[in-house]
Image: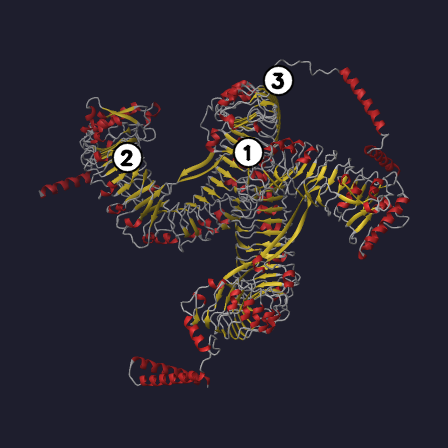
Amino acid sequence: MCLFHNLIWVILLMGHLHGYESCIEKERNALLELKKYLISQSIEEESNSVLPTWTNDTKSDCCLWESLKCSRISGRVTEIAFGGLNLKENTLLNLSLLHPFEDVRSLNLSGGALNKFNGLFDDVEGYNSLKRLTNLKILDLSSNKFNNSIFPFLNAATTLTNLFLRSNNMGGSLPAKDFRDLTNLELLDLSRNRFNGSIPLQELSEMRKLKALDLSRNEFSDSTELKGKNIQELDLSHNKLVGQFPLCLTHLSGLRVLDLSSNQLTGTLPPSLGSLKSLEYLSLFDNDFEGFFSLGSLTNLSNLRVLKLCSKSNSLQVVSDSSWKPKFQLDVIALRSCNLDKVPQFLLHQKDLRHVDLSDNNISGNFPSWLLENNTKLKVLLLQNNSFTSFQLPKSPHHLLFMDVSVNKFNHLPENIGWILPHLRYMNISNNGFQGTLPSSLGNMKNTEYMDLSRNSFRGELPRSFINGCDSMAILKLSHNKLTGETFQEPPNFTNILGLFMDNNLFTGKIGQGLQSLRNLSLLDISNNNLTGVVPSWIGELPSLTALLIANNLLEGNIPTSLFNNSNLQLLDLSTNNLSGGIPPQHNSQNGVVLLLQDNHLSGEMSDTQLANVEILDLRNNKLSGSIPEFIKTQNISVLLLRGNDLTGRIPHQLCGLINIQLLDLSRNRLNGSIPSCLSNTSFVTGKKCTSYDYDFGISFPSDVFDGFSLQQDISSTNDSSRYFKSLLMLDPFSMDYKASTQTKIEFATKYRYDSYMGKNLKLLYGLDLSENELSGEIPAEFGELMELRAFNLSHNNLSGAIPESFSGMKNVESLDISFNRLQGRIPPELTQLSTLSVFKVSYNNLSGAIPQGRQFNTFDTQSFVGNNLLCGQPTSRSCNSGTFQEPDSGVEDDDESTIDMESFYWSFAAAYVTILVGLFASLSFDSFWRRFWFDMVDAFIQKLHGYKSCIEKERKALLELKEYLISTSQDGDRDFVLPTWSNDTKSNCCLWEGVKCTRTSLRVTEIAFGYLFLKEHSLFNLSLLHPFDEVRSLDLSRCAFSALFDDMEGYKSLSRLRNLEILDLSSNEFNNSIFPFLNAATSLTTLFLRNNYMNGPFPVKVNFQCSDCTSDHSYILLDSLSELKNLTNLELLDLSVNDYNGSMPELKNMTTLEVLGLAWNYFSGPKPIEVLCEMKNLQELYLSGNEFVGQLPLCLGSLNKLRILDLSYNYLSGNLSSSFSTLESLEYLSLSDNNFEGLLSLDAIANLTNLKVFKLSSPADIIQVDTESTWIPKFQLTIAALPFCGLEKIPNFLMYQKKLRVLDLSSNRISGNIPTWLLANNPELEFLDFSANDIGGVLPDYFGHVLPSLLHVNGTHNEILGNLPSSMGEMKNISFLDLSHNNFSGELPRSLFTGCVSLQILQLSHNQLGGHILPGQTNLTSLIVLRMDNNLFTGEIGTGLLTLVNLSVLDASNNRLTGAIPSWIPEESHMIMLLLSNNQLEGTLPPSLLAVYHLQFLDLSGNLLSGELPSSHVNSMYGISMFLHNNSLTGSIPVKLLENAKILDLRNNKLSGSIPQFVNTGEMRIFLLKGNNLTGSIPWKLCDMRNITLLDLSDNKLNGTIPSCLYNLSFGSREEEEMTSSSFGAFDFGFVESLEFEFYKYTFLVEEFSAYYDTFMIVEIQFAAKQRYDSYTGGTLDYMYGLDLSSNELSGVIPAELGELSKIRAMNLSRNFLSSSIPDSFSKLKDIESLDLSYNMLHGDIPSQLTSLTSLAVFNVSYNNLSGIIPQGRQFSTFNENSYLGNPLLCGPPTDKSCEAKKSTKEADNGGEEDDDEAIVNMMAFYWSTASTYVTALIGFLLLMCIDCPWRRAWLRLVDSFTASAKSVICQNH
């Protein structure tokens, strides 16, 4: 046997040495036959490429042929493989051709992309064919088109060990029985087929030798129990398995690989997974597991190398405590969506990790740099979508290749990232909060191919090293940052880049020529920047460019023709620039191009080839003219948008050939003619002919980084150096496609609004918009065939005829608008079949008949049908059954009815002319207003020709007499200022005097105005002084403080002498109702102002007045008629506003000419308060604000069709807006603010008010919810829209159509989401914007200030806005007020904010997360008054930029992280009033210059690290100062002058020492707090001079001595005069009124100007101990808090009885001192005391029973004293518990458990019921003797014990020795 073995080895050795000459001839011929067959089955043009090395050359060794291997000994073929064949369809393989290869062991027939066998056959052997291949072990039939028919053939290959059938067309149930004879099978791969049903694991288990089974990527839904003990690898991934985890799998003890990923398994994961001891690979990715799973259950799987867990439902909670240490070393760990809140601790023990995926969890904290340090082989790190905050890198470089940390909360990118991670090829850090500039070390990443830095807050320019490095870059994303500078003026080094995204930044300048070197660039996006200049022509010459986006910049000039010559270009977006000129005639794109050129200034006409090779063309909102050309080559166009140009002419018939059109928008042009009926031939009928269009453009290519990690089938390979895990079935694959794309977004009008459509939504939208043109004729009936149409708009044209019944065929239409035409006839009832119709509008036509009902028509409101007076039925209010409703005559109209008889026209015109002329001359003979007006005009004309000299002497003297009278009634000091220009100089022209105007011809005085006069009290005006001015027309006596009128000659008829008086202004005086009889005589009045006087009572008033002709007994009579102003029949304007009228509204029926009525700010009410005005049909302006009207708005207001102004604000109205408001077509101003409207309020009633300019609505009770979902389109353009307190949850839709807003107030609502971009972009004239107190989130658009440069006032406080402040805010040059406090802004403040907003007066940014330095450099904010930046994250020192804020009065930078010293450069003459820098980290001393600032009233430096001594200089505050210096480290003594001019001084918790000085000038001190210092000495008597003190806290010091009895002089609120005169100090308020110099709306005496009280305030918060705790007191609560705290000192002596005089004090604390004596009975006078603490003293005696009268006492503590006697009971004392009396053993009675009965009986027996006064006196002699004896006894005992040897004796002696030695050494040193 040994010899036999040796012989075999010799034969093998000889074979290796000599080889063989060639393959066997038989097999050679068989191979050629096989090739011949394959050629016959290949496509003819590919026949020459079939196995080209298989030749008939006899010298050719077939063993060396392609895809063959032979035995080295026998020369027989052992392996055959086909590849790269391009076969015909349905090709079958003839198995008989394989029979000659008896020794073949491996047969690889797997296909590629084209090599697809469909079946097997053998005409001789049949199904037994493969049985002839007795040595066949491996058969690979993957990637073909085999179906289940091949299984009988395969079952004959009984020698097979490996069978690969992946990626074929097999399906149905898996026929496991067809493998019953393959008993030697070890590997079976059936993946990537379509098998379904249950997995027959039980049948497959009968294959005893089966080790690896791959059933992945099928459609299996269930499985039976698997029993095979030899199974080692099982892949069931990517199926549809449901139910819980199969527990049978945990019994497969030999299992090495288990993959159940991407199924639908649910339930919890079993801990028994830990029993699979051989497990090396476990993947449970993408299932729906839930509940808790402890990774500790896997601790004993020592062979585990790959672990993957993920729950799609995010319901799996993976836990990993730190108590276990794993026995395995992993290569791959993936724990995605496992609800982790920290990095699992067991990873600390892993050293061989190569792939880590912890994405989609909730992990917070620092970046796990230790993962890199511990695992030097780590290549992939995925941490995206977590909450990591700090990015910390290891100290040494690492070879990481792939890193994704996007969607976290990082804010700082390490500067050395490029040096630590130089080998990165993929880096994604997008969607974080990274700030600052880009690290220059990024240029060291030479191998990076994909880098995504988008959606952060990076700023500054791109580093030079970055541009010159990164030469492997393929995709770079820098979008949505704040990067600045110019774009690549020099060529970058990454010349192989494919995608460059720089959009939504702040880049400026021209498009850099450096981009010209990027010859491989495919996608370039630099939109939404501030680029200027022209579009360079070379950009169109980039050879690989497929998508170019430069939208939303400031580019000018023409469109380069090179862009239209680039044949590779597929997307060109140049929209929203300033481009001009014409459009190149044709684009040469090979694959179809998308052209977005809207919102420019393009002009000229379009070419007929404009649509050639174009898929989307958007030319909206340009200046194109001419007609629409007859386009050619329109087969590709899918979207054509020409809205908003100047196109004219007809719609060409060539548009009917748009076979692929989806959206066609020709609206807002001037197209005329009829609508072509052939438009029904377009794709709106049946959809597009071509559906392959994709409007999303991008680039994608696979990474070549991880080739070794991709899936391989070469199971014989041993090279696994770059693989994660190797098995029979798989290598753990990792691959990543580098993707970058952009979506095409198209805006189209549907359902009354413009929406954006992209992606799949865009592909499904079909729309046709021909609205707002001049189209005429009938609507073609053929349009009913447009079945695919979803939006159809023909509104605002001149279309006539009926609505086609064929419209019922538009089955998919959702929006149909044919309003504002001339349509007639009925609405076809067939339209109710349109089940998808959600918007239907036929308003303002001539339709008639009944409105159809049913289905969608039941959902339409009246707005759909308004303007059709002959329509009836729901939802209108007109009934179709009414007898008055008639159908229009259906007969044919008379064609001649419109013919004009010209002869009759001429005669009628001449007669009318003569009649008017005669009437004019006749009218001039009567004395009337218009006659006088006519002659005035003539006088003015003549005067211009001749001029005039001076006024009439009579009137001149009368004016001087009038002045003399006014001087006599003026106050003494003001007489010299009364009408100073009215002089007696004969050369002075009185017509030029102040307040006087004359006619130009007659020189008569026509206007007199006094102006401001300072008269004596109760001054009367003598009307007789006005009689000489019989031509006066206007008399202005306003603001003169007259109390009444009189005339001793004419009496009440005085004003009748002024027969030309038309305007009388008596406003702002002190007149009462007594003047009405005088006024009733001025019958010529047209305008009467009585506002702001002292009139009251009901109106009409009843006035008692004196009759001059009556006897003395009846000198007073009651005149109602005069009080009603009955005779003022010419009155057009009556203003009674701002008086005290009450009761019902006045009935002014007699004033039929009244046009303007002002009754605002009175107290009118009544059952029907407003209805009485509805009869006044001529009213144009009605002011009823500020009254007490209740109930609903009266319907009759709708009858006042001339009304222009209606102000009902500040009343108590409720209900809803009546539909009658829709008839107020003249209404311009409507104010309903501050009423009690409640519930859902619809604004539909105002939709058609075409003249409306001002609309105000609010309900401060917050019980209203304005309907925001209405789809009506307003006909008005508002100037002012004020909707605060309206319960809005979104911005109302009607604001979308407003373009002229100047004031917008949406404050105090519940609006959420982002600020709509359209709201800002549509209203460039906006000056006042208030969206405060909402739930608005998102970020402020970067262009916020750019599109709103006119803003004056912005209030966005109390929202949830994120991100950085836009740098464009610097463009708001006129802004005065900006409040963005209480949001979530972050990042640094843009420099432009401080250099550009030159008019800013108030800037409030409090309570955000802003960072960086405060004003490090110069600013231009010279007008800034208030700057509040508190409660942010600002760092560094206080910048010198504050020096440039020369008018700054309030600075609040408290609660930040400021460092350094407080600057001393604030000058004395500074305007600073409030300075708050508390709770920072400021150091150094308190600058003395701060105390010298003259205007400073509030200084808060508390909570810092200040040290040193307090300045000893004088406090120079003009109005008194409040200083808060607590919680610092101030040392030294308190300066004696510190309290001068101080109102509040808080020095608590410092390190002050010394005694309290004898302060001077303390009369203004209100709060004085010195708690928690090291003060010593006694309480100075000077403190008793603090007459206005409210809180005094000297606790927690080392004060000694007695309590000064003079403290009772301290007021603590007890002085009545203080209560009357003292002002609140709980809040400091600083404000000023700023009336902006413009008017939003003006009409008659209503001027809607903007005036706001800009104020800023600081709530003073003081902590004071009361009721055994420290509470904070603020605002009004602090004003009423009075307290004295002397606790925790070393005070002694008695409690002064005088303290009982502090009757207003609420808290007194004298605890923890050494006070003796008894509690004063006078404490019963402390009537307002709430907290009294006397504990921890040496008080004795009884508790005074009088204290029970203290009804406010809530806390009473006398514990740990020497009190005795009975505890008082009753009232508040019944509420105190035992803790109030602890430590007083001689006290008895409740609430203690000591009874007082025994003590009472003893006292009564010894003293006859009288108490012994000496019971508390101690026998001092007995005390001294007992003390001495005790001391002697203890001393003797101690000496006796020292004689005994014991451990403590020795310890004592050692202690004495040590002390003695120490004492000696000290003495020696001193000598």
Residue located beneath label 1 in the image: 1270
Dot 1, how many residues are within 10 Å of its Cα: few (below 14), some (14-19), or many (20+)?
some
Circle 1: residue type: Ser
* Image quadrant where one finds the N terminus: top left
Circle 3: residue type: Pro
For the residue pair 1654 and 245, the one nearer the viewer reads as: 1654
Q: Position of residue 1048 (x, y in %)?
A: 85, 47
Q: Nearer the viewer, mark 2 or mark 3?
A: 3
Instruction: Find residue 1797 and report its image quarter.
Output: bottom left
For the residue pair 1223 and 1855, the one nearer the viewer reads as: 1223
Instruction: Find residue 1256 and report its image quarter.
Output: top right
* Measured Cα–Cα span from mark 1 to mark 2: 51 Å
Tell me which numbered mark, 2 or 3, is placed earlier along the sequence.
Answer: 2
Rendered view: 1530 above or below 1015: below
Residue located beneath label 3 in the image: 888
Q: Position of residue 595 (x, y in %)?
A: 53, 31
Tell me the element at label 2.
strand
Circle 2: residue type: Asp
